[in-house]
Image (cartoon, rainbow, N blue to C red):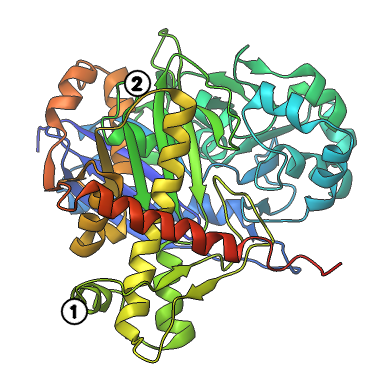
Amino acid sequence: MDEKLILAIDQGTTGSTVLVFNHAARVVGKAYSEFTQHYPSPGWVEHDAVEIWEVTRGLIGKALASAGAGPGNVAGIGITNQRETCVLWDRIGGKPLSRAIVWQDRRTAELCSALRQEGLEEDWRARTGLLLDPYFSGTKLHWMLENVPGARTRAEEGELAFGTIDSWLAWNLTGGKAHITDFSNASRTLLYNIRELSWDSEILSRLDIPRQLLPSVEPSSKVYAETDPSVLGVSVPLAGIAGDQQAALFGQACFERGMLKNTYGTGSFLLMNTGHEAVACKERLLTTIAWGIADQPVEYALEGSIFVTGAAVQWLRDGLGIIGAAAETQALAESLDTNDDVYFVPALTGLGAPYWDPFARGALVGLTRGTTRAHIARAALEAISYQTRDVVEAMVRESGVGLSTLRADGGAVANDFLMQFQSDILNVKVDVPAVPETTALGAACLAGLAVGFWSGKRELSSKWECVKSFGPAMIKSESDVLYKRWRQAVERALGWAQPLG
């Protein structure tokens, strides 16, 4: 094979995937493997960073083989990653001092609470775009420095390096030449000032974090370094990095201000491109850097995280046992003409954006003797759409930009009932892309731009293809009534777990 290709590493929470893309931006090779999850204490979640690297490295050759290609065909490599998981390692030997702390880990909840009680949240939110939550990696790093033996002293002496998983992979791919991250991942650390585009001195001081630990922050699309020949047998440009949700936004070709994508997974992540403006939120959405392309000004996004969407369908299967597989929900939902006023608020782990109520709990309302499992299955699918509208309306209010189309990706886009109902409730078109691996595609596109594989965003937009489109089929006044009833159901779920009195 003489064809040049782009290789994308999609390093996720439970596994790594390596994909190979051709010039048509289509997947021609793929390899996947899971890795071990560690739960050493309640609320703690850890990964073995060495295992992640070894698994990922092993997949590169397998993905190229599945494409019928070799290392010489690779024009560039892009990385996308689980954003807030972080690693602390030795600069000399490259060995981690401990396991990586995963984004799901809650061990710094007390520290975050103490910082909020100091009255720091609004100021830090203005600087970083984020809330004070253990989700983000800054407080994880503080914990490592305080609790990993020798870490504090060695960090202050400049012997250690810190980074999110993109930094760890870049370090290993380049044989330790590149200690880097990109704008999108830096903006998820709680340490980076997204307006000044620099590590924030005041936050570093309060968390007692030595600046020399931190990686250089680079554009999301740039040739950073060549890979070490020991990795692929040849040197290849490492040329693109982006956090998973920002990469999906790029892979969906949401390049214009106001364009919006939703990734439907266990939970859902909505990101809206806000252009060169970092929108200051009043509704507890997150302001984040979407990407930076070479020497162009960075672009920003609003992000809304919904905790439970696909997980609600999993609960119907595993918790209630009323379905055998997620795919059954479509036929069950379509067996009814209406929802018969049955609503399911899937606040099984509280509610995320725009409510941010950890005391909310799941609620089924409107049940009668005539309620069947079909009603509950339909209510679970409808809830995904209602929660999406909750976030979309907040984004529209914050940005001042109206929505005409939602680009959808993730496993749930296979459910035609859900996609049609989503279009009806939002009263906008919902488009599903021909390439479902939008996260990896985004990383590939960023790398491809940097090495000249693609000429620019215009060419990438021309390669984005809609495989299925859903337009509103419901009268708007009818969808508004359904949504109003949803909001009434939410009111009954909010604060349920708060102690009485």
Q: Position of residue 15 (x, y in %)?
A: 44, 58
Q: Position of residue 279 (x, y in %)?
A: 52, 21
Q: Quadrant of the C terminus?
A: bottom right
Disc number lying in front (1 or 2): 1
Up/down of 336 relative to 212, above or below: below
User: Which residue is pictured at 87% across the width and 49% down the height?
Assistant: 147
Which numbered circle lies on residue 127?
A: none
Which numbered circle lies on residue 335?
A: 1
Up/down of 373 relative to 337, above or below: below
**Which residue is more in the foreground, 45 or 326?**
326
User: Which residue is pictured at 74% across the width and 69% down the height?
Assistant: 42
User: Which residue is pictured at 46% across the width and 52% down the height?
Assistant: 12
Q: Position of residue 305 (x, y in %)?
A: 51, 47
Q: Which type of secondary structure does the marked residue at label 1 adopt?
A: loop
Left or right of residue 449: residue 34:
right
Q: Position of residue 266 (x, y in %)?
A: 44, 61
Mark 2: which amino acid?
A: Arg
Up/down of 264 relative to 165, above or below: below
Left or right of residue 302: residue 131:
right
- Residue position marked by numbered label 2 in the rendering: 257
**Which residue is more in the foreground, 246 or 283?**
283
